Image: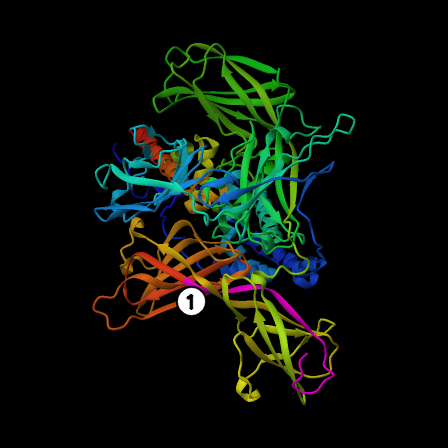
Amino acid sequence: MTEFVPMAGFEQQLRLALATPEPRPNFERALRARLSERAAELTPSHRPFRLRLAWGILIGVFLLLTLTVLVIGPQRVAAEVRKLLGYIPGFGIVEQNASLRVLAEPVSQTRDGITVTVEQVFLTSERATVKYSVVGVPWSAFPHNENVSGCTEGAQLQLPDGTRLTLTGGGGTLMELTFDYPPVPAGIDQAIFILPCLQGTLPGLAPENWELSLHFVPAPANLTIMPAIDIMPLPEPQASQPVVASNPLVLLKVVDTGDNYVLLGEFRRADAGDPSVPDGFWWSLTEPVHITDAAGQEVFYTIPDDPSLQLPPSGPGAEPWAYQIGKTFAPPLTITYAGQYTVPADPNATAEFEFDAGADPQPGQEWVLNRDVELAGHTITLVSIQVVSQSGQSGYQFTLETTDPAVRDVGVDISGYLAQGGGGNAGLRPGKWEKSLAYADLPTGKLTVVLSNLTLYGKFRTWQLQWSPETAQPGSPSLYGIRLTIDRYIPLEDGYYLVGHTNWTDKRIAGASLSGGVLKAYDSGGQELTLEPADWDKVGLTPEPGQWLYRLYGKSFNGPLTLRATQMNVEFAQPVGMTLDLRSYGFDGLDAQLGLTWKTGLIPLDVPGLPANAFKVTYVKSGELRGFEIGLSADPALQGLPLTIVSGLDTAGMNAVNSASSSSLDETAGQLVSTVLTDARITFPLVLSASSATVGGTWEVTWNLPAAEPGANP
Amino acid sequence: MTESTAPLSPGIEDEPKLISAAQRDPAEFTALYDRYFRPVYRYLYSRVGSVPEAEDLTAQTFLAALEALPRYRHRGRFAAWLFTIARNKIRDHYRHSSPSASLDENRADQAEDPLTQVTRSDQLEQLLELVRGLNEGEQELIRLRCVAGLSFAEIGASLGRKEEAVKKAYYRLVARLQRQLEVDHD
């Protein structure tokens, strides 16, 4: 197919054609002034009092596992835990006693510098799932013409008797894919993974017809299976009880991955009705889904990276959803779906009129009608009809208009002719839209156009769902179980030395220390006192691991005092890693690419307790060092994640290698940037790791004013 | 699906800082206003074709953005968020009033000063007519790209579509317009 290249300057012509008048300078100035006035009203001293997160948590109570269903209107609370399940990352949810087989060990094959690895296989009596990765595909093997697609053929599993299992589902990226198959019968412990071609590549530009031999064994006893709780509603109310509307927003399962919760549910359209809305309605979201905590603060959520966490729909019209959240929130959570109804007008109402298309209508031929049509009490204008031709089919496009703001869409047909397809763009711009009908043979001559199935904009409606985890604790949920403790105090003439330490309970952490002297002191009235990091040598003490030393100035204040830290440096017991491979993006390491940014898709980082994903990479330079700024989207509690290069550098001929790394956070924007730089030549895959992080939170300890001898313990 | 993309629009590297500053102190919002005022105004004008309506909708859009900014979480798509607000204001506008013309149909109230009216050559008028003949979805794509100047990623985020799909749709559309223009000249 001939590739079309827009004529140079054509887009500029398009912009000129669409040029609009410049805005009036007076208007621009006036609006700026108005915004400044409004901004002054919105500054913190003017904002109405709002319960802060810390107070909200302190006010919180110990909660049992509950499911609270909240609707705008009648309320219904329903909760019952039915059964315990297990979640296997990359595979999905299984019952606790399910028979499970896995791949004995990963299998790799390398051809022409490209490595295919079957990483994981899970077999149950219901399905088989194969996860594999591909590394080393050159950029040149992929198409760069939008009209050309590469390999889309899926892999098969061949059993020893020659039977081939074909795909039933799957997904992933070009480099990591997961495929589902029908179950492998019990007693069969090997199969051949047959990959005809590498996803997305062009024929002949990458090795094809891969075959990898797989061997299956019973799942080991130490296989990671995370608890998943099945949440079911109470039985339906009896007939004598008032009928209560069901909430279409349903929570079905909760998976505890250790670091996060994954909430799994569905939106059941059949339950999205309203007594004031007629049958035949359609409800749709009008804004993104919100998840908020007890204090009304937005809770950061992601869509789980594991496609196996997507539940199948429970029935017609049920739309599954899955949201992954961290564990540092003040329960209960509220999930909010906000949207609007579209409702049918009189379903029996129709309107017809005739128009003559002639004996031989041609593509592009148009009839301007501007004909008003009355339908179910509403007026619609049929502006024009045009013959259209696309992809070998012909049809008619109808341009419609209305000044009635309630009208959303109308069905269009040509009497006596069966359309093979069609389309429309109703709802994109109220008041004007197009409908199209496609035919195998274009209707000609005198035609009767029928308008029917008028739909109208309905009311806005919001559904909400609340959930609390079983083990919610009163007080601030402490990340990693970090606690501050005051060990001793030393009275001074004009204050005190305070010696304390930081401890933690989470085994995934090897150390926790105050970050950058951010410990602050407040008296009982909330007044901040002067508190500074002190010099151990001056005091004549030797610090123990995790200990800190601060000097408190003054002695005349109202106790007890509260010492508060809002940031900690934590050392991970195991480093957090990620792998970067920009070969398929055409990265060549030359200076011409400095400043370029690539969107990588979400690369999850396994930061304990805090969801984090890398999503973009920018090639940067600092002095003689070159490297990458990696943009991270993460839980707001993660405020720094310095990454270092573990492998992937070509240091041949170098006596020494200079490297640098840093991490900075735009706190309210919720974006982390981690920068890695080196003067060695970068090769791929580039393996990075972080052994520490800066985390935000609130950690407090109370100190009662002393009445004892110097050097006493508090 | 992993994808590569063109470099981010120049000059927006400091955007996270501007947003952060405005979230801390609403008075700093004017920096974002200065950056996006013209693109938003032009886009809204291309939708309503009337100076008073475009001004009113522009004001509504920025006031709404200022109010909602504390809840905004920056993931590199501020323009998409802002234009989503603008599109919602358009929708509300049409729901409560008669729809106005779009794409620069001449109206008496377009401009007080004739010199501010845009003049076009015959070819550009022809191109404009071709654009007016597109369906609404196609016109919206052209508006967001050529009038508002959004990147494909921002357009995708605003329309709820994947960036690659938006890019393909746009270039196919441009190709079609160019061919139609060439055919008309033949």
Residue that numbered label 1 is attached to: A662
Would you call the spot at circle 1 few (<14 residues within 10 Å), some (14-19), or many (20 or more)?
some
User: What residue do we see at 49% from left, 35% from top?
Assistant: B105
- Compared to B119, does A167 lie above or below? above
- Compared to B11, does A534 lie above or below? below
> Start and end of the magenta stretch?
A690-714
Quadrant of the frame with the N terminus of chain A: top left
Residue A169 included in the magenta stretch of the image: no
Observer-nearest residue: A378 or A644? A644
User: What residue do we see at 48% from left, 41% from top?
Assistant: A92
Percent across and percent down for residue A504 are: 56, 66
Percent across and percent down for residue A540 are: 55, 88
Observer-nearest residue: A27 or A281? A281
Residue B12 in view, yes or no: no
Type of amino acid under label 1: Ser
Percent across and percent down for residue A598 are: 37, 52
User: What residue do we see at 53% from left, 64% from top?
Assistant: A695
Question: A383 left or right of A615?
Answer: right
Identify the element where label 1 is drawn.
strand
Q: Residue furthest bottom?
A: A493
Residue A330 in view, yes or no: yes
